[in-house]
Image (cartoon, rainbow, N blue to C red):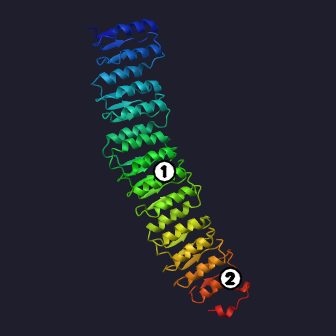
């Protein structure tokens, strides 16, 4: 029985190589075949790959020196598949590429001995990384995979996925600014499903859009260990915000959520708010640099709801409008410790003024209130006047640059006769409307 065949440096070419392949097809005992430097093309090498797929004793197949072949990858295929003593394999800088990665992936499917594989600097792109990922779904033995220096940004995600799966104490996933993309998230979440202690996930700056986010939120819906989630500087839109809202509806462990510098607009923020307002677990929310005027208001809602030591709310010139004011008013129901509220330049209008007034009627600590430049007219002034009658400690009220008119001034003037407000611009308005100032001198 033929065990070893060495035909190197013979210029047998493709035709000769195929004849050798046909002749050896039934030689199941063949262990070593050397066809290096024989002017064999990639197409002929592929035929060898097909011919010898059933040879489980071939541990060394040398095609080096055949310029067009994925010689290293094909040699690695037989070594990984058939040499049960191979536990580490270094294939750095061999120009393996996607096709060669496919050979290696096929070998990994049923390998139970290889523990470390180094494929750094091999021109492997997205297809090759995808084939390796598919192979590693079934391979439970590989503990360390190295792919840095390849062309696809997902390589680090696949490296990390192998690490997550093999390290039982893996608690923090910190991969910011690595361009892993949507499929990189898929690799990671597949591995994380087998990890019950992961507590922090930071995938900021990774070119993740709603599709990639969906992989992550599907995983997090039933996760009970992740407390911190950071997804800053990605491409998450309103749809992604909906995925996050659905996840938060069932997740009771996430305490920190960062979504700064994404593409979430008002509708997405509203969907988040519907869930977050009822969520008692979330302690910190970051939404800055999203194209929504409501983002900062929802941030403040969480801050006020969770931090009972806050005594001042400063939210100037953010244009939060009446919807944003509703978030702030809801938060004030949870936090009764504010001494000062500054909402200058937010165009909350009459409806926003009503939301605020309804809360302030039962607010015990407020000393200073600034509502300058908010589009409040006489109706809004009436809402505020009703609240002023019950606020016990308010000392300063600023309503400059609104449109409360004469009737609004009268509502406020009547309220101020019983209020303890010391500093207010209302009296200046009275002069404009020639009201009897003696009545309000107190």
Using a 10 Å C-alpha cutoff, classify the residue at mark 1 as few (fewer than 14 neighbours), some (14 to 19) or many (20 or more). many
Please tell me which residue is depicted at 42% across the width and 49% down the height of the picture: 201
Query: The C terminus appears in which quarter of the rendering?
Result: bottom right
Relative to 135, say whether 246 is above or below: below
User: Mark 2, mark 1: which one is toward the viewer?
Assistant: 2
- State yes or no: discs 2 and 1 in contact (Cβ < 8 Å): no
Q: Is mark 1 on a helix, strand or loop?
A: loop
Could you say which quadrant of the image residue 352 lies in?
A: bottom right
**Spatial CA span between label 2 and label 1:** 50 Å
Q: Name the residue under label 1.
A: 231
**Can you name the residue that lies furthest to the bottom here?**
438
- Decide which of 166, 110 is in the foreground and name it: 110
- Decide which of 10, 273 is in the foreground and name it: 273
Relative to 351, say whether 169 is above or below: above
Residue 346 got which mark? none
Residue 221, percent from left and from top: 40, 52
Res. 294 visible in picture: yes
Relative to 241, say whether 332 is above or below: below
Residue 95, percent from left and from top: 47, 24
429 left or right, relative to 282 = right
Q: Earlier in the sequence, mark 2 or mark 1?
A: 1
Res. 232 visible in picture: no
Query: The N terminus appears in which quarter of the rendering?
Result: top left
Please tell me which residue is depicted at 34% across the width and 32% down the height of the picture: 116
Q: Name the residue under label 2.
A: 407
Please tell me which residue is depicted at 41% across the width and 12% down the height of the picture: 36
Using a 10 Å C-alpha cutoff, classify the residue at mark 2 as few (fewer than 14 neighbours), some (14 to 19) or many (20 or more). some
Residue 293, percent from left and from top: 59, 60
């Amino acid at each position: 029985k033929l065990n070893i065949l060495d035909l190197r440096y013979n210029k047998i070419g493709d035709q000769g190589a195929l004849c050798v392949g046909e002749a050896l097809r039934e030689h199941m005992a063949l262990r070593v075949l050397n066809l290096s430097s024989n002017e064999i093309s990639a197409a002929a090498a592929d035929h060898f790959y097909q011919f010898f797929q059933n040879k489980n004793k071939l541990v060394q197949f040398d095609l080096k020196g055949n310029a067009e072949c994925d010689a290293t990858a094909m040699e690695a295929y037989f070594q990984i598949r058939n040499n049960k003593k191979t536990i580490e394999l270094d294939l750095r800088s061999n120009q393996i590429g996607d096709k060669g990665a496919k050979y290696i992936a096929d070998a990994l499917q049923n390998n139970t001995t290889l523990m470390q594989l180094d494929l750094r600097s091999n021109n492997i792109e997205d297809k090759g990384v995808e084939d390796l990922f598919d192979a590693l779904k079934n391979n439970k033995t590989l503990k360390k995979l190295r792919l840095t220096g390849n062309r696809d940004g997902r390589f680090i995600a696949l490296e990390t996925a192998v690490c997550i799966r093999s390290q039982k104490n893996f608690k923090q996933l910190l991969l910011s600014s690595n361009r892993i993309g949507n499929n990189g998230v898929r690799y990671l979440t597949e591995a994380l499903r087998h990890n019950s202690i992961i507590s922090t996930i930071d995938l900021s700056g990774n070119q993740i859009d709603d599709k990639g986010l969906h992989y992550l939120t599907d995983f997090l819906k039933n996760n009970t260990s992740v407390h911190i989630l950071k997804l800053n500087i990605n491409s998450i839109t309103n749809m992604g915000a909906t995925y996050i809202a659905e996840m938060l509806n069932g997740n009771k462990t996430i305490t920190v959520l960062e979504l700064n510098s994404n593409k979430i607009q008002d509708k997405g923020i509203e969907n988040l708010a519907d869930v977050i307002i009822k969520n008692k677990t979330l302690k910190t929310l970051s939404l800055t640099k999203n194209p929504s005027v409501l983002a900062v208001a929802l941030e403040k809602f969480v801050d006020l709801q969770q931090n009972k030591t806050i005594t001042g709310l400063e939210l100037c010139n953010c244009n939060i409008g009446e919807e944003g004011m509703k978030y702030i008013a809801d938060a004030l129901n949870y936090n009764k410790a504010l001494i000062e509220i500054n909402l200058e330049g937010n165009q909350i209008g009459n409806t926003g003024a009503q939301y605020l007034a309804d809360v302030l009627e039962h607010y015990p600590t407020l000393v200073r209130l600034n509502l300058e430049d908010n589009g409040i007219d006489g109706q809004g002034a009436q809402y505020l006047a009703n609240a002023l009658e019950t606020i016990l400690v308010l000392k300063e009220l600023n309503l400059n640059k609104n449109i409360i008119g004469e009737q609004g001034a009268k509502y406020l003037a009547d309220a101020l006769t019983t209020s303890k407000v010391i500093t207010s611009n209302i009296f200046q308005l009275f002069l404009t409307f020639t009201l009897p100032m003696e009545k309000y001198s107190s």
